[in-house]
């Protein structure tokens, strides 16, 4: 009897872990785009890896729980054939993904709950993106304000607060152009700048996409 209880307990733990990982992945996907919770940024970015791990956990639960079932081997094999490649593909893409680093962080004047974060993405096409991070009831949220291709010399050179609710972005190169964006009380920007052009002004539903 103790062996059966131990087996049931292990199956319950495997299923619980799979459920928690699935819930985290779904919550991350639901808070994607503009205003996404930073707390759920990792599950949101690693959804494919989590899907693979969940399938592997389910396969382990099947092997552990359905000892006498004729479907045990077939079902576990199917789950592993789906889960292992997903986990491997996600891990491979994660290794190939370009590194990113914060190059500047600046708190909004007079506001301890809001800050600018400039991120450098060193991929095939280097880019610098600017975000506003703002504390809220459920934790810190992130809003994209602008994303510019190129290094500091020809892309986004600097960004700063001109007031507690207004951000100025200055480009490098010959143009030295400056763009200003108003930040609403919620943390949303009035518009998102992409590659230095107003591709989708006023889009507050999701992150702007290039045309």
Image: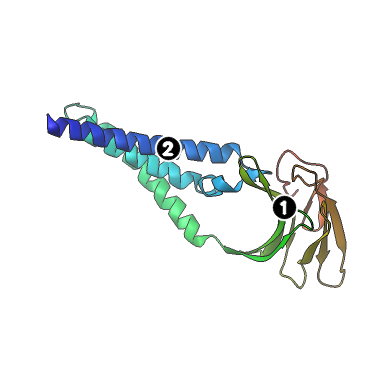
Q: Residues within 10 Å of mark 1 (few under 14, many from 20)?
A: many
Q: Which mark is residue 114?
A: 1
Q: Position of residue 125 (x, y in %)?
A: 66, 63
Q: Is residue 73 visible?
A: no
Along the horizontal axis of the image, is 176 left or right of 131? Answer: right
Q: Position of residue 124 (x, y in %)?
A: 62, 64
119 relative to 206, above or below: below
Q: Position of residue 153 (x, y in %)?
A: 76, 73
Looking at the figure, which quarter contains the N terminus? top left
Q: Are marks 2 and 1 in contact (CB under 8 Å)?
A: no
Residue for point 27% across, 34% down: 11
150 relative to 136, above or below: below
Residue for point 39% across, 47% down: 85
Q: Position of residue 203 (x, y in %)?
A: 78, 41
Tag 1 secondary structure: strand
Tag 2 secondary structure: helix
Q: How is the image coloured?
A: rainbow
69 relative to 156, above or below: above
N-term mark: 2 or 1: 2
The foreground one among 117 and 126 is 117
Q: Residues within 10 Å of mark 2 (few under 14, many from 20)?
A: few
5 relative to 201, above or below: above
Along the horizontal axis of the image, is 27 left or right of 13? Answer: right
Q: CA distance from mark 2 to mark 1?
A: 30 Å
Residue at numbered disc 2: 20
The foreground one among 129 and 82 is 129
Q: Is residue 41 visible?
A: yes
Q: Which mark is residue 200?
A: none
Total labels: the figure holds 2
Residue for point 44% across, 54% down: 91
The foreground one among 62 and 180 is 180
């Amino acid at each position: 009897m103790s062996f059966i209880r131990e087996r049931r307990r292990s199956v319950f733990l495997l299923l619980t872990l799979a459920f928690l990982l699935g819930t985290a992945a779904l919550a991350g996907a639901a808070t994607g785009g503009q205003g996404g919770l930073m707390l759920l940024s990792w599950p949101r970015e690693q959804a494919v890896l989590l899907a693979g791990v969940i399938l592997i956990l389910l396969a382990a639960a099947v092997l552990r729980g359905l000892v006498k079932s004729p479907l045990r081997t077939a079902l576990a094999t199917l789950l592993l054939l789906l889960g292992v490649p997903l986990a491997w593909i996600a891990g491979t893409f994660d290794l190939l993904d370009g590194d990113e680093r914060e190059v500047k962080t600046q708190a909004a004047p007079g506001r301890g709950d809001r800050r600018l974060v400039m991120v450098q993405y060193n991929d095939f096409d280097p880019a610098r993106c600017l975000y506003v991070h703002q504390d809220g009831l459920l934790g810190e949220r992130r809003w994209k304000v602008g994303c510019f291709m190129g290094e500091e010399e020809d892309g986004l050179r600097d960004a700063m607060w001109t007031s507690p609710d207004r951000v100025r972005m200055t480009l490098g190169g010959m143009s030295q152009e400056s763009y200003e964006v108003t930040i609403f009380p919620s943390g949303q920007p009035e518009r998102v700048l992409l590659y230095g052009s107003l591709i989708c002004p006023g889009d507050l539903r999701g992150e702007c996409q290039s045309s």
